[in-house]
Structures are given as structure tokens and as C-alpha cells.
Image (cartoon, helix red, strand yellow):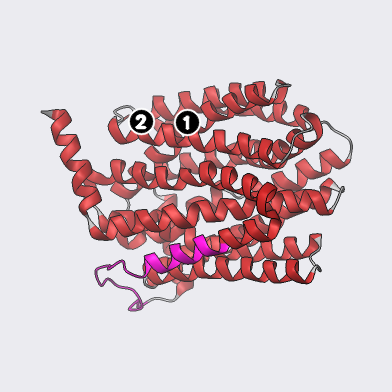
Amino acid sequence: MEAMSKTRQGNSILKNRNFLLLFIGSVFSAPGYYIYLIAAEWLMLTLSENRVYFGMLFFAASVPRLLLLAVGGVVADRFNKRTILFLSDLLRALLIATLLLFLYLDVVTAWHLIILATLFGIADAFSYPVTNSMTPLLLKEDQLQRGNSLIQMTMQISPILGPALGGTLIAVLGFQGVFSVACVMLLIGSLTVLFIQLKQGNEGKRDHSPWTELKEGLAYVRQSEFIMAIMFIAFFINFFFSGPFSIGMPIIVKDVFEGSAINLATIQTAMGVGAMVGAILLAVKKITNYKKVILFSLLVVGCLYTFTGISSHLYISAILVLIMAALLQFVNIPIFTILQKTVDKSMLGRIMGLLVTVSTGLIPVSYVVTSTLIALGVDIRYIMIGGGIFIVIIAIISFKFKRLRTLGM
């Protein structure tokens, strides 16, 4: 009977027209975004042998994202979320179209890619809070974990289809072909979002200034021990993981494994497959002890990350990345589900914006530190090993963190 109930609930979610449109939009926009990313990364590696430029590509996208995420959260609470998501995807499509023009004119440089990455970061700052705060407006509370898992599955199609298609298209059609596909997919995703119908809320009818609302969001966070604890963990985990992994894996594939764009796609596809597997498991299995699941997953991720730095074989690295990605879903989805259940819906945009701001706060620094260490001659594999060790330490310490006791609900 329980299995039949879960099946009916899953079907009812997919029969929800607005949620289905969000689902379909993600199926197009997320892979299109990742097709662009892998193509931009490989184009940067092709344009310049200076790996500092490669690190700057990530830094340029992360800085405006960090600075504007809190603003994006306020905007998400004040204006129509559907319109914001549409404009964000449309802007990405137009930016890729601009890059295509540069390619056709044969004038593209490393600095063009860095500037476009900056503009992508601005678009991200407004789309992230909306995406994470829209689901509870479309679904009932008891559907949120399953709904979040389904949305994550569509988001994780991006690291599967995106790198796979991107690497293949680079080899078959060249950079012009791969960027054309990415542009079209983002355009379709943006148009799909326009058909979502949201109930009229308080958008555009606020009595307070945006600055006052931002301070209200900060006060709300300070009053929640759970949110403060999650921000503490995410703040440091992202520093030790995001920079070394994002910059390191493409460099390892090209310089250590002496691989191609398709080999890089293999690693990134493995990450997508793992993330999707984790999301599927959470779609069919309800979590009862959030603290143990989240912190144990972090502990194992730290260990696997260390082994990834040690690995000298492409496919072993791909397997390690796959398992890490699956376990990271057991951290992210429960956190978002708890927040969506407990946070006032009128505050969701701001809280999600602030959470992502704090959790990604050290990522630009991580990119700079990683790039600097590489420029000084430090092997990227040693940087990743060190990052994995620190993640293990943070996970162990967090098991005794009193503010996480509320995760046992």
C-alpha cells in the first residue's frame, strides 16, 4: 500500500502542469548551460597555455554571482519568479550568441571568455534564488522532497548530457557547432518557463525598501541555529572542494592523463550520473535522520576526494567522482527540503539567496588560491588531496556541532 501511495504521489506531481513545465524547462536549459561550460573550458585551454587564465574563467563567473546573490534573493521575493527565470535563461542564450559572432569573425580571445563568464555570473545570481524558491509554490509540503529530487534529476541531466554532447559536438562540429546547440537549448528552456502560471502573491507590492527586506532576511538567518550551522559547513566545504575540483579536473585530464575533450566529458558525465543516482534514491526513499545522512555523506566525500587526487587513471577517477556526486545529493536535497518546509514562503527567495551567497562566499578565493598555487608550481593533485583531508576534518568536527541537533528530525 505504501509503494502504491508513493507511485500515486509521484504521478500527481508530474500531472501538475506548472511543475511539469518547470521540469521540462530544466531539461533543456540545464544541459544547454553545461554544454556551454565544457565548450568554454576547452576553448580557453585551446586559446592559451597559461593556466592562470583558466582559473580566471571561474573567478570571473563567481565574483558577480557572490556579490549579487543576496540582491537576487530580494528580487525573487519582490517580482514574478517566472519572469526572472525567463530573463535569466534568455540572457544566457544571447551571451552565447555573442560568442558565436566572435567565433565567426575569428576574433575571440581569452579575455572575451572571461568577460562572458562575468555576465553569466550575473545571470546566475538572479536565477539561483528563484529556482530554489519556486518549487514550494507549485507543490504541497508533503511532495517537496520528491519534487526537489525530480528537479535535481533534471538538473543532473546537465552534467550527463551536457559534457557528453559538448565533447562530442566539439569533435564533430567544432566550437561553432557546440555553442549553437547550447544557445538553442537555453532559448527553448526560457520560452517554456513563460507558460508557468504562479498565484498572485506580494510581488511588486512591498511596503519596505529592498535594503530593509535584505536586513530582514539577515535577521531571520541569525535567529535560526539550523541555517547558521548549515552556512558554517557550506562556507568552508566549498572553499576546499569547488576551486580545486573545478579547476583541477580539466587540467588533470589534459596535462596528467593527456586526454581530450571527450575524456573531460567522461569525468563530468560521471559526476552527472552520480548526482542523478543520488537524486533518484532520494525520490523513492524518505530520510528520517538528516544529521547522520548529511554529515556521514560529507565524511565519505572527503575521503573519496583525497583518493581522486591520488588516482592516476581516468576511469578510476570517473568512478570516484560518480560516487562523490551521488553522496553530495544526500547533503543538498535534504537541506533544501528542510528550508522549504520551515522558512516562511515570503522569505524563501531571500533565505535561498543568502544561503547560496554564504555557501559560495569563499569560492572566488578558492579559485584564486588554487590558480596561484598552480602558478607557483604546486601540483594540482596535491591541492586536491589537501582539500579532501580538510573536508574530512570538518565533517568529523560537525558531528559534535550542537547547532545541528535539529537535523535529527
- Picture quadrant of residue 192: bottom left
Residue 390 seen from this side: yes
Q: Nearer the viewer, residue 224 or 197?
A: 197
Does label 1 or label 2 sit earlier along the sequence?
A: 2
Residue under circle 1? 326
Please provide percent x and percent y for residue 409. Answer: 29, 32
**Distance (Cα) linking label 1 and label 2:** 9 Å
Residue at 17%, 29% (x, y): give it: 3
Residue under circle 2? 281
Q: Quadrant of the N terminus?
A: top left
Q: Amino acid at mark 2?
A: Leu
Dot 2 alpha-carbon crowd within 10 angstroms: few under 14, some 14 to 19, many 20 or more: some
Q: Nearer the viewer, residue 358 or 279?
A: 279
Residue 215 seen from this side: no
Q: Nearer the viewer, residue 118 or 46?
A: 46
Residue at 70%, 42% (x, y): give it: 261
Q: Is residue 236 left or right of residue 296?
A: right
- Picture quadrant of residue 319: top right
Q: Is residue 286 magenta?
A: no
Q: Using the image, tell me which numbered label, if any, was put on residue 160.
A: none
Q: Amino acid at mark 1?
A: Ala
Label 1–label 2 contact, CB within 8 A: yes
